[in-house]
Amino acid sequence: MNDYRTPPPSHSALEGTRPDAEAGLRGLAKRLVTDERLSYAAAVRAEQEAREEEVSLLEHVIETGQVSARQATLTAAWEYGLPLIDLDAVRPDTLPRAEHFPEKILRKLKVLPLVQHGHRLTVAVPYPSTLAQLDELQFATGLTPEGILAPVDQLAPVLEGYLARSEKSMLDELKGVDDAIGELGVEGGGESDEVDLQAEARAASDDAPIIKFVNKILLDAIHRSASDIHFEPYETSYRVRFRIDGMLHDVAHPPFAMRTRIAARLKVMSRLDISERRLPQDGAIKLRLSKSRSIDFRVNTLPTVYGEKLVLRILDPTSAQMGIEQLGFTAEQRGLYEETLSHPQGMILVTGPTGSGKTVSLYTGINILNQVERNICTAEDPVEIKVPGVNQVNVLPKIGLDFASALRAFLRQDPDVVMVGEIRDLETAEIAVKASQTGHLVLSTVHTNSAAETLTRLANMGVAPFNIASSVSLIIAQRLARRLCPHCKQAADIPREVLAQQGFNEAEIDGATIFEPVGCRRCTKGFKGRVGIYEVVPISDTMSQLIMKNGNAMDFDTQARQEGHPDLRRSGLLKVMQGLTSLTEVNRVTKD
């Protein structure tokens, strides 16, 4: 702690010893050199890298470990004339209650409330640049914030503990909730299909903490970019998990006795029957976060031996507007997809397991085709993303509206493009084939592991080989791999023989740098976001002849490789060489 508490060397102490050390440097960079925190060359390089990353110099040198957080923050405090606080001396019980401040903003700005006097709020900030962002906190709270610098390595854990104590107090409140579930049924039971969180926050009094807890979980999931929320009862415990970038993470453990009340609250919000606990139910929640923004959730309940498990799928409308350049196709694969989309007829099939991004790939194609001169119809189970200009139908098998009947209706609606959520049976497959052969472009999904297996799956369904050969134009097999965090990834030391066993050739081993995850405050265990891995196979004349000869999946796969189309494994290795993901992650998503 001596380096943290002791002022940096004075300028006069260094004068005459390094006369050119500060040449060309200004501000904090000059001070870091003067105080012997960085060499001149390192300071110049750090300034350039910080500009490229669009972050402050202080943040960059701390994140990259060039200067310790405490040394760098002390130097910045001297340079900018800002007060500095040692959070080790702050007692957690003296801090203002976290419930009085918006958690989203505290996490976003990484600021910690310290003291409130009237309308003035003193907060610890990690960087001087954060001071310019405090107006966001002022707008949300109506208080006037004043910032004090604190080393980020101190601030981050203290802030997490501060927010965790707030969540714990909320869970403690749950333990005292009365048995009256009827009160929960009042909320969100109006005529509107939307649940207004702001109105509910006003209505949720101290004697209804379940409402506040559920709202907090939903908001946290949105802020952390989760795709699913799992509410899971077990024999003596109850947990909540988020799926982030394809992986599940524990986020809360409410009291076990509250499982039925939490389930009832979610069922009321999604317009489900709270008295029915023996059968699965499907519903939806539409949360209105503000006047201009709403988020949709797809809700499913499952009766387990210890109570009802609920899974909420978060439907992000922005994913439907994702450009094709963002998906992760290589230039050749993108060209094949775009070319096939331009054809007036044929069938494009996307295949992969649940959660592999098939819907996003299909909707990216639909958005390319969505022009005023085209009639586009889709049949989905259910419609997850609503797109203006596209005629979307929810299939309802209980009343006889399945994929096949929806397709038959589409063909009487003069369509140009038809999208079928999934080809599951022979009837749907035959109607889709007929549509693709009679002047319609058909897009659909099939659940298989590779492009070659898709052709054999259609044959096994009973589709005639000549119909497969004449209708299918392109098959896309895909997976989603977690994307390495660009801020903390580091080069991995992997032996050459291991890389050779994994599938890299000699030239790639010599020229490529393989990265591995590390983990920092900007990511989740070294990963942030996901990237697509694709196998894109057009049906060539040779492939059509092979289909007519009743070839098997191995024959199709061999032919695709001969025509120069990399399989999923090879596409994944290309992403590893590009530094987008790790070898371990590719092994996880492409293993058979």
Image (cartoon, grey):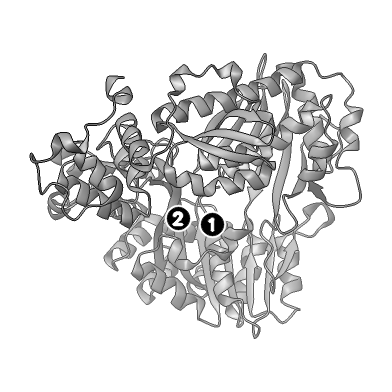
Q: Amino acid at mark 1?
A: Lys
Classed neighbour count for the residue bearing mark 1: other residues with Cα under 10 Å, few (<14), some (14–19), many (≥20): many
Residue placed furthest toward the bottom: 373
Is 436 above or below relative to 361? below
Q: 36 or 9, which lies in front?
A: 9
Return the x and y of residue 109 as percentages of the image width and height. Answer: 52, 42
**Residue drawn at 65 percent across, 30 percent down:** 117
Helix, strand or loop at label 1? It is helix
The image's mark for residue 478 is: 2
Residue at the extreme front of the image, as rendered: 12
Q: Position of residue 9 (x, y in %)?
A: 21, 31
Whether residue 232 appears in this view of the structure is yes
Quadrant occupied by the N terminus: top left
Can you give x and y, in whole percent of width and height, for residue 315 in the image? 65, 51
The three-letter amino acid code for the residue at tag 2 is Gln
Q: Is residue 118 above or below residue 28?
A: above
Residue displayed at 54% across by 71% down: 347
Q: Nearer the viewer, residue 254 or 327?
A: 254
Q: Where, quadrant-wise, is the C terminus in this rendering? A: top left
Q: Residue at coordinates 83% horizontally, 52% vertically from top-left? A: 193
Proximity of marks 2 and 1: CB atoms separated by less than 8 Å: yes
The image shows a total of numbered marks equal to: 2
- Return the residue at label 1: 358
Give above or below for 493 relative to 293: above
Q: Is residue 36 left or right of residue 387?
A: left
Query: Gap between marks 2 and 1, in whole Å?
Result: 7 Å
Residue occupying image coordinates x 81% and y 40%: 200
